Image (cartoon, rainbow, N blue to C red):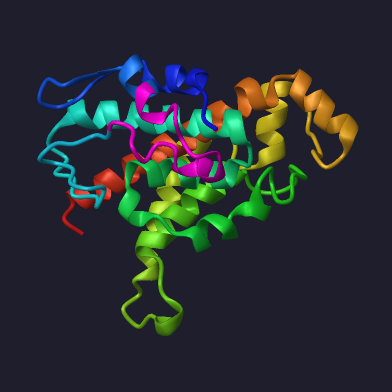
Amino acid sequence: MLRLALAERLGHRFHYPGGTTITTLDFAAAVKNCDPAAEIDCFENAPRWSSDALSAGNLNASGKDSDMDDRLLQRAYDLGYEFERKYHGCTQCVIAAVYQIFPAMRSEDIFRAANAQAGGMGLTSMGQCGAAVGAGMIISQLYGRSLGDIGDPEKKRFVAYRLGQEFANRFSEEMGSLICGEIQEKMMGRRFNLLEPPDWEAFEKAGGHDRHCPVVVGTATRIVVQLLLEKKSEGE
């Protein structure tokens, strides 16, 4: 179950458009009785962002309210950070955080398909950062080509490619790399294979799940949400 501590860390004091203020206590009251069998849904009854520019999580963003966007991006970061800190599995945590902000996107199949990519693929740290992979899956969910149109004569897939490249550029600028192991080296001084018990223990002692990977997941979530808002503001 999401405990009060999680609510306290996520709640802060949110100032919603229109002057509404949501406090930590309001947030805690919304989540404290969550069903333990549905932990990922514990935010369903929590206060949600709302304004004329963002409707029902359907990405109806006008791009005109920069203050709202800033607060939304902070919430994206906080959600990604807390999902990773509590549940681990960076790829799925990015997706879960985005789904909390845009619930109309929710897909159990896409969330499940993200499992093995965590930690640079299978927790090896050898491949691409799992948080970046999760962001790419979110982009592709909205803008990728479909199996039924795999020929893609209109080249729609290049929208996803361009957004993916922009994500890669922004994420690499902030994190220093797209590669899991290189990010680990930068933040913790070495790489880890988290299926090896000694590496898992060393990772935990280095603050991997308490501090470092939550920052990476929060950053990836914020960047991809920002890209989605920017894209929607273009009217596409």
User: Percent from the top left, x then y, of residue 180?
Assistant: 67, 40
Q: How many marks?
A: 0
Q: Pick the quarter of the image with the C terminus.
A: bottom left
Q: Is residue 193 visible?
A: yes
**Residue 215 covered by magenta stretch:** no
Q: Is residue 9 left or right of residue 55?
A: right
Q: Pick the quarter of the image with the N terminus.
A: top right
| Above or below 150: residue 11 | above
Look at 62% across and 43% down and name the residue there. 129
Look at 61% across and 45% down and name the residue there. 130
Most foreground residue, 144 or 3? 3
Q: Is residue 51 left or right of residue 140?
A: left
User: Percent from the top left, x then y, of residue 26?
Assistant: 31, 20
Look at 15% across and 21% down and name the residue there. 20
Residue 123 falls in image quadrant: top right
User: Percent from the top left, x then y, of residue 201?
Assistant: 83, 26
Most foreground residue, 161 or 56? 56
| Above or below 183: residue 160 | below
Look at 74% across and 42% down and name the residue there. 125
User: Percent from the top left, x then y, of residue 17?
Assistant: 14, 27
Residue 29 falls in image quadrant: top left
Instruction: Give the residues drawn in magenta, as a range.
Output: 29-47
| Above or below 140: residue 117 | above
Q: Is residue 174 visible?
A: no
**Residue 30 covered by magenta stretch:** yes
